[in-house]
Image: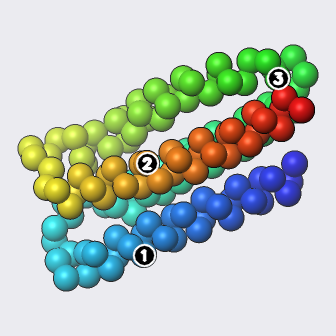
Amino acid sequence: MINAVLKYALYFTLAFAVVYTFQKIVMRDNPEAMRYDYLSVNAFFALTSYVICVLFDVLSGKKILKQQLGYAYLPTLFVKVGLFYLLFKNSIFELANLTLIERLNLLIPLFLFLILEVILMARILAKNNN
């Protein structure tokens, strides 16, 4: 259990470092192109995905919940979107038009962390079925 939690932390930390480094390199020539803090956006996606994976890994050990984990995972995306809106409505959602760079800096981390989360959740659910 602790081993899995540490693995998840390593995976999400590495993904965060890769995304943030890539964004820093791209934004090096034009740092004013971003009108919101992409560090906090990346941190949000990384932390929420990490918490979801750890939570479901813990819940997979409970016999009574084993059969319901797949169904319980589905609403987490909606919860994540709702939290994102609540936390970033003043900094991102009030901007009139997002530039292409701003949109990509939202979507790339979202999909990267979502893909990593889905891969880890598939492993948790597969381990749960064995």
Vertically, is 60 above or below 41? Answer: above
Query: Is residue 55 visible from the viewing direction of this image?
Result: no
Q: Quadrant of residue 124?
A: top right
Q: Secondary structure at mark 1?
A: helix
Report whether 66 appears left or right of 33: right
Please name the residue shown 84% across and 29% down the image.
Answer: 129
Mark closer to the chain start, 3 or 2:
3
Image coords of residue 130 (percent x, y): 89, 32
Q: Which residue is mark 2?
A: 111
Residue type at numbered disc 1: Thr
Query: Is residue 82 visible from the viewing direction of this image?
Result: yes
Whole-number angstrom distance, CA of label 1 to CA of label 2: 16 Å
Q: Quick one: which residue is furthest to the left in this view?
A: 96
Question: Badge 3: few (under 14), some or many (20 or more) residues near its Cα, within 10 Å?
Answer: some
Nearer mark to the viewer, of 1 and 2: 2
Report whether 68 appears left or right of 80: right
Q: Which residue is mark 3?
A: 66
Image coords of residue 56 (percent x, y): 73, 35
Disc sitting over residue 21 in the figure: 1
Image coords of residue 4 (percent x, y): 81, 53
Mark closer to the chain start, 1 or 2:
1
Q: Secondary structure at mark 2?
A: helix
Question: Badge 2: few (under 14), some or many (20 or more) residues near its Cα, within 10 Å?
Answer: few
Whole-number angstrom distance, CA of label 3 to CA of label 1: 38 Å
- The residue nearer to you, when weighing 26 against 54, is 26
- The residue nearer to you, when weighing 123 against 16, is 123
